[in-house]
Image (spheres, grey):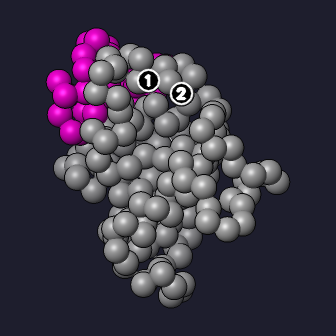
Amino acid sequence: MLAALWKSHFAATLQGGKLLAGHLPPHQGHVIQDNGSIAYGGPNPVQLVLQHPEQAVNPRWKLRKTLTESGGINVSMMDELGIKEEWLHRFPNELSGGELQRICVARAVGPRTRYLIADEMTTMLDAITQAQIWQALLRWSKQNGVGILVISHERRLIERICSRVVEWANGAYVR
């Protein structure tokens, strides 16, 4: 697993994650994934989980629909993440931020996911919830051969969960 430790402005990290996940087209060139360009606007094997889950879900959809957006509901991942069945009958505004983030993580780990970009994904969560989410993701990643790019300002987290660290500051590679 690779981590990018960012010491730059929030907008730069957000744009980078969105670019790599195919949410934004590059101004020049191409984003290449598995010898092909990333598809924009369609199913994508690169998934992005952002820091603010309320901005990543449709507020008019019940959460079951949100979860099925990725191709199905992974029941074992729901269990590992502590997602309760009754949450799926609710709207996003009826869950806490931590509960909603668990839903976003479960949606991102669909059957077609090959790469996951975790952009400050657990920053707003308490330490116990952070640990539970990361343990579940690390197990899932190993079992499914999925690469994870962790974008974070939290050096201790990165050193604990990542096998390789790339550090950026002011848009330039540091180490």
Q: Which residue is mark 1?
A: 67
Based on the picture, tell me whether residue 84 belongs to the magenta stretch. Answer: yes
Mark 1: amino acid: Leu
Q: In front: 23, or 121?
A: 23
Q: Are marks 1 and 2 in contact (CB under 8 Å)?
A: yes
Q: Residue at x 27, y 56 (%)?
A: 123
Q: Quadrant of residue 31?
A: bottom right
The answer to whether 5 appears left or right of 140 in the picture is: left
Where does the N terminus fall, quadrant-wise?
bottom right
- The stretch in magenta equals 73-100
Instruction: Check disc 1: other Cα within 10 Å, few if <14, some if 14-19, many if 20+.
Output: many
Q: Which residue is mark 2?
A: 70
Q: Residue at x 35, y 33 (%)?
A: 57
Q: In front: 80, or 8?
A: 8
Q: Which mark is residue 19?
A: none
Q: Is residue 159 visible?
A: no
Residue 80: x, y in percent? 39, 30
Examine the rendered structure and indicate whether residue 110 appears above or below residue 157: above
Q: In front: 12, or 98?
A: 12
